[in-house]
Amino acid sequence: MVNAAQNIDPQRLEALGPAEHVVRTLTNYTDHLIHNRPGWIQPDPSANIGAKWAYALWKTEGDQRVVYERLPKVRKQPERRVKIGVLGEDMKIRNEQGQIVGRFMNPGLYEEAIVWVYRQIAEIWKMDNDFSAHFASWSWGKDHRDFKNILAAFMLVQSRAGEPVMENGKVAFFDDDFRAVGEAMCLLRGKYDINPKMLRRIRKILDLEGVAQINRELGFSKSAREPAMGRYPGAVRKWLRSKERNPKLLEGLVKSEFKETVKALSRSVGYKPESPVFCQTLRWKQDQAKDGRRVVALDAKIEKADTWEGLSEAEICQRITKDRMGYKGVVGRLPPEIGLTRAIMMAVIEAGGLSDKDMIIYSPTIEELGLHEVPAVKARLDKAVKAAEGDQRGRNVGSRVKDKALKAKLDEAADIATAKAMEEVTRNLRVYVVVDKSGSMHRSLEVAKSYLTKFLGGFPLDRTHVSVFNSMGTEVTLKTATATGVEHAFSKHQAGGGTSYAEGVRAIAHHKPEPGEDLLVIFVGDEGDYSPDRLVQAFTGAGLRPVAFGLLLVPGDNRPRVVQQTAAMMGIPCFRIEEGLFNDPYTITRTLRNLIATTPVGQHHGAPVDRAPRKTLVQEILETPLLKRPRWAA
């Protein structure tokens, strides 16, 4: 499971063009597959899945349920609401003319998105079964939970299940068992493993009619009514058995507020405990079924749930400190008459009840309680900032705090997270960022600047070169690789003048890639230039051979497609960076990291021996060993 794969066939890498394209499509999908807030789904032909989700609520007005979309705050302006229509019993939303404009979605699975992604995984499967198994194995160690859930669901039901292959009436050999990869994803433990809530979600994904239909099309299910479950029930039973046989693990799940989820998992697969201790730990009282089949824990004594009713604030703090309780467990037990006080929050922090991510997430609450000025809390927050990784939630949270010093600290956490995420994928990569500031960008330049502050600081300062252009190009020097540094560097540039993408390249073309480095060029603009020939000449005249273009296309002219045409003329890929990416602080770094990882690796003749070549995302996936079930579950 942990050893690197050996001797990857170069021809096999070359043959994976279609798979690489699908992987790029998956990593470029920027919306959530699960929404924990209510919203509405509206048709959107420009989106990959043909629809988009937006935060919405309904309220009763007279005898109607009127749906309002809640728009995000703009600086100091209050939150805005826009009337969409009336919600019917069928959950469809109709406008004043009675036309259906979308559907209302309660918190939960975003079916359209999940079915679309599942379909892409199915396309990979049809092209290369083995690649699909490596893709799933690669995803297990990553932090993108939604894709991991879908890949695990797919691997648990796909048709390669280790069946015997017969020859002359005898078993010649056994087929590859890729369902074992799905089991391993559910059962292995690690930093980003599948928790009980995710395990429950896999079942919900397989239950979706759109997913069930794809499984029928692929021959994974013979039933026209029941969805394919494959090895999901067996994997869940093994998971539950392992927790029952390791009481500390089961107690840890209860302490982490997964008690009800474990119960739901048990019910979903008809799990039969080995002893009454399982139900006692979960405080799960058992009643006899109508058919009389239950024999475990019927007479077991179930302790009452721990309650803090009647405890004083001091007694609650003592409980938190003694049991080292987490924030969520504390909030769920607090009596309404006491609530979350300054002393209780301080006790949670001192007891280690907030992880580094939690410290960042709950910073507004910490500030509201006046704890951000306490030296011990400041030190704990500093530690959380330095350990920040994975996403830009710090910047998102920072927009909700008032203290400037605390906001700066949270912005720093986002910068650190971005830099960490980009460190490996930008190794041996020189990056040009070319930004359009022509007259057609007068409405989009400020938007483009805000996007740049969210990702540009993640690139290595010594190998990142930035220019702005209209009819002439100007190099932009970043003082620091942070959002503040980016904002300062662009503060003096305003939209105006003509458009020449070639001049934007020429302004920084003197920064040549070192031997062994690849050149990636990211264009930010509306492609409002009719001269792809001049842009090609700007590269060839300077002796530059980029391996790929990135394109952050913002509203403006949007007709000539100069960047995409130039990429086609030079025979290199051009990947789109969707604007929607920047609306979600949890996906910015992950999506950019994966997009950049798909950048091809150039041919480096005469590169230094000590300069190890980059690996593309496809190569990284192929070199990931297939997951194996833990020994106790084999």
Image: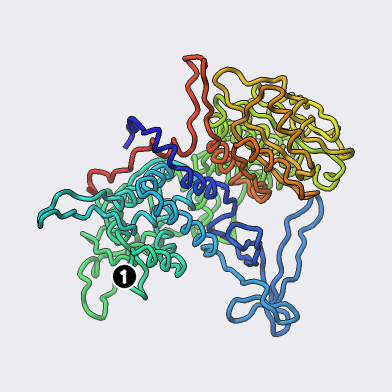
Q: Relative to 52, is 237 on the left or the right?
A: left
Q: Quadrant of residue 161?
A: bottom left
Residue positioned 61% across, 35% down in the render: 548
x then y, percent, for residue 545: 63, 27
Left or right for 522, reference 3: right
In the rendered image, residue 396, in percent from the top left (x then y), is placed at 67, 45
Q: Is residue 633 visible?
A: yes
Q: Nearer the viewer, residue 226 or 569?
A: 569
Q: Nearer the viewer, residue 593 or 59?
A: 593
| Label 1 crowd bin: few (<14), some (14–19), many (20+), radius 10 Å | few
Q: Quadrant of residue 454?
A: top right
Residue 15 against residue 513 in the figure, above or below: below
Residue 66 left/right relative to 339: right
Q: Amino acid at mark 1?
A: Lys
Taking depth in this image into account, of 322 and 130 the one nearest to the observer is 130
Quarter of the figure with the N terminus: top left
Element under label 1? Answer: loop
Q: Position of residue 448 (x, y in %)?
A: 76, 42
Residue 220 location in percent, x, y? 33, 63
Q: Which residue is mark 1?
A: 222
Side (left or right) of 403 relative to 261: right
